[in-house]
Amino acid sequence: MNNSATTRSITKIALEYNSNDKGTAEMVASNYLLSDTAEGQFYEMKTVAERNPKVKKWALTGYISQPDEIGKKLKDEEFKQIAMEALAKVGVTNKNQYRLDIHNSTKHKHIHFVVNRIDISGKCTVKAHDIGRRFGEAVREVCKEKGLLTDVEIGIQKKAEMLKSLTEAIRSEDNFDNLISEMKKKGFKVQLSSNIKDGISGMRIVMEKDKNYQTERIYKAGYKLSEISNLLKISEIKSVFEMKKAVREAHKNVANLKEFRENLQQKGFSVKIQYEEEFKPNQKNEIQNLWINKVDSNQQKNGFFFRKNVGFSLSETDSDLGNLVTLLNSNNEVNHQNTHRESASNESLIEIAGGLLGDLLKPTYVSQDEDELWKKKRKSR
């Protein structure tokens, strides 16, 4: 459950807001309050608070909001009980004045509370230190005790769903405009942020069903990309899109593997080929996957898609890989034979394969050090 709690010095407006909510508010609990009006209750609380003049921020105010995953299952009495038990865990006793109201005017039902931290004997029972975090933990404890999902558990589920949909959209699209449209089809709103230096620099994803314009100022729906995944960065998504555009352009303009590699090399990309089995010269070798990297890439660490010293796996980043592999496999055998005829007769078959394929994967891939070794060998000849 989304929740908030803070200590402050209030006016009668706080209680008036609690008791109104566009005429839909329903008071579900009160304690040591005699007046029937919000104004009268405020002055009752203020009178008790003055018994402890050392405490300036004498009121504890906040709310608990039900997400759809829980709210549809709870009755008002159960909802009130969760709030009461959570408040008790942070110090509210049966000697504290309070008022709890359920609000129904917004998309998600929520309960507001105003509590006098000073009890009727003049003692401050609710500590102000870190109250927001402590109250959140209290709400989670109560939810666990009652067998309900906590806001953290619900958040984990939502983030996993967002990440799955986002990576699917990245695989199928090659620019941010199309990614936003694809995510919208999946029920998500993507909000991008930018700056002068980097262009697009951040992303926030919101479930359409979670959007609540009435409480947007209080609770910002959705999660930043860094909250969804600590591996997937905006810079990596940009690199994926750049690589995929180059691959798709090459796909349209070439007929075989050799031309495909040369086309991408002209665009500044290296290509590593992964075969179904170990490469065999003068035979048809079925391509399983392609690994593509920007030659001048300065990315040093593994990312969500990126593998250090190797690049991006096309099978992981492009849902259209099958069409490309079919085209390259159909011309693969002829390409090898032509290249072999042009090679020097004193080169071994392994060196010929190295000259043709560069970073041959057997069965995964070779390191950049091996690649440099082959280049030096060929250059010395």
Image (cartoon, rainbow, N blue to C red):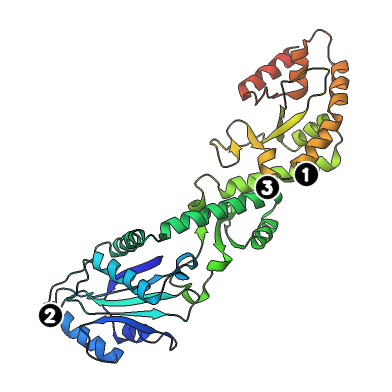
Pointer 2: what residue? 51
> How many residues crowd around disc 1 within 10 Å: few (fewer than 14), some, or many (20 or more)?
some
> Mark 3–mark 1 contact, CB under 8 Å?
no
Res 248 → quadrant = top right
Mark 2: which amino acid?
Arg
For image coordinates 32% across by 84% down, the residue present is: 15
Q: Can the viewer see residue 263? A: no
183 relative position to 84: left or right = right
For image coordinates 56% across by 51% down, the residue present is: 163
- Residue 63 appears at what percent x and percent y? 36, 72
- Residue 191 appears at what percent x and percent y? 58, 62
Mark 3: which amino acid?
Arg
From what the image shows, is residue 43 above or below residue 201?
Answer: below
For the C terminus, the image quarter is top right
- Residue 169 appears at what percent x and percent y? 66, 52
Q: Secondary structure at mark 2?
A: loop
Res 313 → quadrant = top right
Q: Secondary structure at mark 1?
A: helix
355 relative position to 12: left or right = right
> How many residues crowd around disc 3 within 10 Å: few (fewer than 14), some, or many (20 or more)?
many
CA distance for labels 3 and 1: 13 Å
Comparing 60 with 243, the one in front is 60
Pointer 3: what residue? 171
> Mark 2–mark 3 contact, CB under 8 Å?
no
Comparing 109 with 332, the one in front is 109
From what the image shows, is residue 66 above or below residue 317?
Answer: below
